[in-house]
Image (cartoon, grey):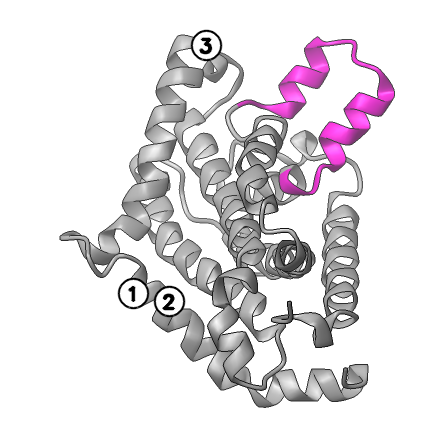
């Protein structure tokens, strides 16, 4: 295993490979479909439509939320970014054993490139989100610029989590079968389809439960994105110290995940 500074230098030297690999994977993802790259936008939109019917119409959660459609679509897009990054990271090593065993390169390149692929896909989805916001009367404001730091922090968090799951998935491939259930549960408690702020006002929940709901990293990044894009989602609906939580989760997952992955660098592809 190379030293940590040497490993970082190796990754930097292969930054062009990481970018090219992510772009190639994104281009090939829907190459066999007749609608091609349109599915990059249509897939999360269709998911949002299903959630709107089930939660917004049947369960009537939209009564507590102003601008519910932009609220819902933003939550779906942001959580999908984390969800797909984690799933891709879980299979990053175990699904690329031929490449890992054939070539010598820093293995962290794979989960990082998969997360970069998901970031590129999110950017396509954000174009559709802007159209939805404008159609529902949400005007562009200076706060939209906050999208950049929010995405930077979430990308760092997602990459760290993907690195952790890549190491775990390389040793125990069955984790990939378990993760969809874990991620689905995580989505339901992250305020994607409902307002955490509204629920906490109406329910007398234990303080520990309230803290877990508010400080849930997925909910933190979703709330910040809604605050940046939707003018009816005000500062009062954000948890206390939300930017500190966002930065803390990004540093904890990013740095911790990278170190955790690096410590097993020499074991990937063996066995």
Residue 45 drawn at (x, y percent): 33, 38
Q: Are marks 1 and 2 in contact (CB under 8 Å)?
A: yes
Q: Nearer the viewer, mark 1 or mark 3?
A: 1
Q: Is residue 96 above or below residue 252?
A: below
Q: Nearer the viewer, residue 117 or 177?
A: 177
The residue tagged 3 is 59
Residue 25 numbered mark, or none: 2
Residue at image position (68%, 54%) is: 168
The residue range painted magenta reads: 194-218
Q: Are marks 1 and 3 in contact (CB under 8 Å)?
A: no
Residue at image position (58%, 45%) is: 174
Q: Is residue 38 left or right of residue 50?
A: left
Residue 210 drawn at (x, y percent): 78, 23
Q: Name the element at disc 2.
A: helix
Q: Most extreme residue toward the front, as rendered?
A: 271
| Mark 2 neighbour density, 10 Å: few (under 14) some (14–19) many (20 or more) | some
Q: Earlier in the sequence, mark 1 or mark 3?
A: 1
Instruction: Count the numbered circles shown.
Output: 3
Residue 114 numbered mark, or none: none
Q: Nearer the viewer, residue 61 or 218?
A: 218
Magenta run includes residue 10: no
Residue at image position (59%, 59%) is: 155
Q: CA distance from mark 2 to mark 3?
A: 38 Å
Residue at image position (64%, 37%) is: 219
Q: Is residue 58 left or right of residue 189?
A: left
Q: CA distance from mark 1 to mark 3?
A: 38 Å
Residue 136 seen in the current view: no
The residue tagged 1 is 28
């Amino acid at each position: 295993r190379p030293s940590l500074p040497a490993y970082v230098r190796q990754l930097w030297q292969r930054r062009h490979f990481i970018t090219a690999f992510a772009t190639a994977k994104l281009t090939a993802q829907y190459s066999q479909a007749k609608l091609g790259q349109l599915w990059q936008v249509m897939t999360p939109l269709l998911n949002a439509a299903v959630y709107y019917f089930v939660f917004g119409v049947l369960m009537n959660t939209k009564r507590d939320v102003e601008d519910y459609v932009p609220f819902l679509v933003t939550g779906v897009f942001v959580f999908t970014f984390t969800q797909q990054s984690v799933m891709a990271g879980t299979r990053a090593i175990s699904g690329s054993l031929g490449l890992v065993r054939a070539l010598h390169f820093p293995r962290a390149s794979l989960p990082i490139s998969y997360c970069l692929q998901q970031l590129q896909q999110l950017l396509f989805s954000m174009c559709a989100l802007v159209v939805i916001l404008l159609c529902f009367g949400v005007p562009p404001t200076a706060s939209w610029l906050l999208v950049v730091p929010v995405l930077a922090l979430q990308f760092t968090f997602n990459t760290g989590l993907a690195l952790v799951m890549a190491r775990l998935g390389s040793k125990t491939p069955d984790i990939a079968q378990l993760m969809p259930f874990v991620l689905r549960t995580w989505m339901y408690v992250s305020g994607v389809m409902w307002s955490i702020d509204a629920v906490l006002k109406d329910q007398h929940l234990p303080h520990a439960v309230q803290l877990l709901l508010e400080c849930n990293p997925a909910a933190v990044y979703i709330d910040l994105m809604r605050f940046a894009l939707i003018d009816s989602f005000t500062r009062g609906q954000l948890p206390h110290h939300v930017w500190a939580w966002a930065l803390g989760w990004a540093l904890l997952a990013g740095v911790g995940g990278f170190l955790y992955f690096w410590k097993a660098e020499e074991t990937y592809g063996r066995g």
